């Protein structure tokens, strides 16, 4: 019997009025309150987190740009890998963690929910070690293959070494944050991430430029500021979980490693992580193809990609709420309500993507100019945003439906959708640049087409998945309508 079937069985034999975790007021709101206002209320603390993550994406590049476009190009080569680790920790494996805990909490399985905390920590430790083992020895060769040469390659290697030495803190902050999100607690994780960004903003200028007694560390200082900010966020979350105020807590004395609990995390987190790898492999493939046109082209692409990625934390702010709401409702057998939550989130995602695309289309030069006034950098970055901005609504829609699929616990379909995007970019981009000689314009048109395919295929697969769900155990409530 699957974990989902066990949860449905538990709910079928117990009512929400039974003693225990199921009558927690936070959980009851996720199960019964009207969908749209509940989703917004749940995500509201995450908007502060989204602002912090947007600040990181933009200010990290801005601070590095003080050192020149070679440094910006070098950090742009590392950025897809850093974003891969961040995305995997927060939105892929992290969502596997929050989904598993949400389904356990929704099903009234408090003992499992508590045990999942330590299982999640173990997964986070293993993943951080894996990233360090892979990218510490191979980083320089990878950045060279992506087109990095001279000072840009040196900057990439220096930045990368510090980031992947401190990978454990990136993984721990996001792991613990998702433990709390799975219980419907968005405020504490958001607060921890805001604290982390305040540390980042404070330390970056000091360590990069050597202000006061600090030595001038350049790009190494930029990376060190990133790692120290994640350490600060980790400490905040550890303090809260250790205080006993969370719905779940560390089970130090009764801990028993159970493969079924690892499986509950990994059945969503594993494929979601591969999906995150594919998403960043798409960015890396694009960076490698852009690298054929020189260092300034890489810098322009990297600056433009920052705007594309700005919508990701905003969508994640609401998407993590979708994972929690869908997961809790699936755990309680309320499939009709779970589907309603998913499509509501998808509409919000398309709106966010549309707003980002409009900004990029109308203010491309101003955005790229914030990082560099080099004419070649401005030209490449503006071209990217003008061609891809109009399709960002489909990117936002696809990202939200992926979050909903994580909450349901079924991500094989979305994995195939991201696979198709990677294939289109890699194969189509190579054809456009190497065989057809259409230059950067042809390459970026292919990248835009890949996003269109992603959004449409994700919608079709999710609609098919919802149609295959078993009938809900309960009749629709007022909150389902």
Image (cartoon, rainbow, N blue to C red):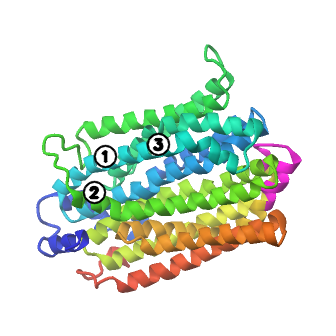
Tell me the quadrant of the picture where the C terminus can be found.
Answer: bottom left
Instruction: Please state the horizontal and vertical placement of residue 263, each as a whole percent of the image.
Output: 28, 61
Mark 2 or mark 3, which has the lower sequence index? Answer: 3
Q: Is residue 369 magenta?
A: yes
- Kindly report the secondary structure that dominates the magenta region of the rendered protein: helix
Neighbor class of circle 1 (other Cα within 10 Å; few <14, some 14-19, many 20+) is some
- Residue 122, numbered label: 1
Distance, label 1 to label 3, CA atoms, is 17 Å
Whether residue 437 is visible:
yes
Question: How far is mark 2 from mark 3, CA to CA?
Answer: 22 Å
**Residue in view at x 30 percent, y 55 percent:** 183
Report which residue position mark 3 lands on: 133
Label 2 SS? helix
Give the extent of the magenta segment: 368-383
Choose mark 2 or mark 3, whichever is in front.
3
Q: Secondary structure at mark 1?
A: helix
Mark number, residue 45: none
Q: Is the C-beta separation of discs 2 and 3 under 8 Å?
A: no
Mark 3 closeness class: few <14, some 14–19, many ≥20 residues within 10 Å? few
Q: Any magenta on residue 389? A: no
Q: Relative to 460, say whether 350 is above or below.
A: above
1 or 3: mark nearer the eye: 3
Specify the quadrant of the image occupied by residue 403. Answer: bottom left
The reply to whether callout 2 and callout 1 are in contact (CB within 8 Å) is: yes
**In the image, residue 203 lies at what x, y percent?**
58, 28
Crowding near the residue tagged with mark 2, few <14, some 14–19, many ≥20 C-alpha atoms within 10 Å: some
Choose the circle earlier in sequence order: 1 or 3.
Answer: 1
Q: Which mark is residue 262?
A: 2
Q: Position of residue 245 (x, y in %)?
A: 25, 42
Q: Quadrant of residue 104?
A: bottom left
Relative vertical location of residue 378 with respect to residue 418 in this rendering, above or below: above
């Amino acid at each position: 019997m699957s974990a989902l079937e066990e949860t449905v069985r538990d709910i079928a034999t117990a009512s929400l009025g039974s003693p225990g975790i199921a009558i927690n007021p936070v959980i009851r709101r996720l199960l019964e309150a009207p969908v749209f206002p509940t989703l917004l209320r749940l995500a509201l603390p995450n908007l502060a987190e989204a602002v912090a993550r947007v600040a990181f994406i933009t200010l990290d590049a801005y601070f590095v740009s003080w050192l020149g476009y070679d440094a910006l190009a070098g950090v742009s080569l590392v950025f897809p890998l850093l974003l891969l680790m961040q995305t995997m920790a927060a939105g892929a494996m992290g969502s596997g963690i929050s989904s598993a805990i949400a389904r356990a909490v929704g099903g009234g399985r408090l003992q499992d929910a508590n045990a999942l905390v330590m299982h999640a920590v173990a997964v986070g430790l293993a993943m951080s070690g894996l990233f360090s083992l892979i990218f510490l020895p191979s980083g320089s060769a990878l950045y060279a293959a992506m087109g990095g040469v001279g000072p840009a390659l040196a900057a990439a290697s220096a930045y990368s070494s510090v980031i992947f030495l401190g990978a454990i803190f990136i993984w721990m902050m996001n792991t613990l944050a998702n433990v709390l999100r799975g219980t419907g607690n968005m405020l504490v994780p958001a607060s921890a991430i805001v604290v982390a960004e305040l540390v980042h903003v404070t330390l970056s200028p000091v360590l990069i430029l050597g202000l006061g007694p600090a030595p001038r560390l350049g790009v190494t200082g930029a990376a060190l500021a990133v790692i120290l900010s994640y350490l600060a966020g980790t400490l905040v979350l550890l303090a809260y979980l250790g205080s006993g105020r969370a719905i779940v807590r560390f089970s130090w004395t009764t801990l028993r490693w159970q493969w079924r609990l690892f499986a509950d995390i990994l059945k969503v987190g594993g494929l979601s992580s591969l999906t995150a790898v594919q998403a960043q492999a798409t960015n890396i493939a694009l960076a490698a193809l852009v690298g054929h046109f020189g260092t300034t082209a890489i810098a322009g692409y990297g600056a433009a990609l920052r705007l594309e990625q700005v919508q990701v934390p905003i969508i994640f702010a609401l998407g993590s709420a979708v994972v929690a709401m869908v997961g809790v409702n699936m755990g309680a057998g309320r499939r009709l309500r779970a589907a309603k939550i998913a499509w509501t989130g998808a509409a919000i995602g398309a709106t966010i993507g549309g707003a980002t695309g409009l900004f990029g289309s109308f203010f491309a030069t101003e955005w790229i100019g914030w990082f560099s006034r080099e004419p070649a950098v401005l030209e490449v970055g503006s071209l990217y945003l003008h061609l891809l901005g109009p399709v960002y609504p489909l990117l936002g829609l696809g990202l939200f439906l992926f979050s909903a699929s994580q909450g349901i616990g079924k991500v094989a379909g979305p994995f195939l959708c991201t696979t198709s995007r990677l294939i289109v970019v890699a194969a189509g981009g190579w054809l456009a640049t190497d065989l057809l000689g259409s230059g950067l314009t042809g390459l970026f048109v292919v990248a835009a087409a890949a996003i269109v395919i992603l959004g449409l295929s994700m919608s079709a697969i999710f609609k098919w998945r919802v149609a295959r769900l078993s009938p809900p155990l309960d009749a629709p409530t007022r909150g389902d309508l």
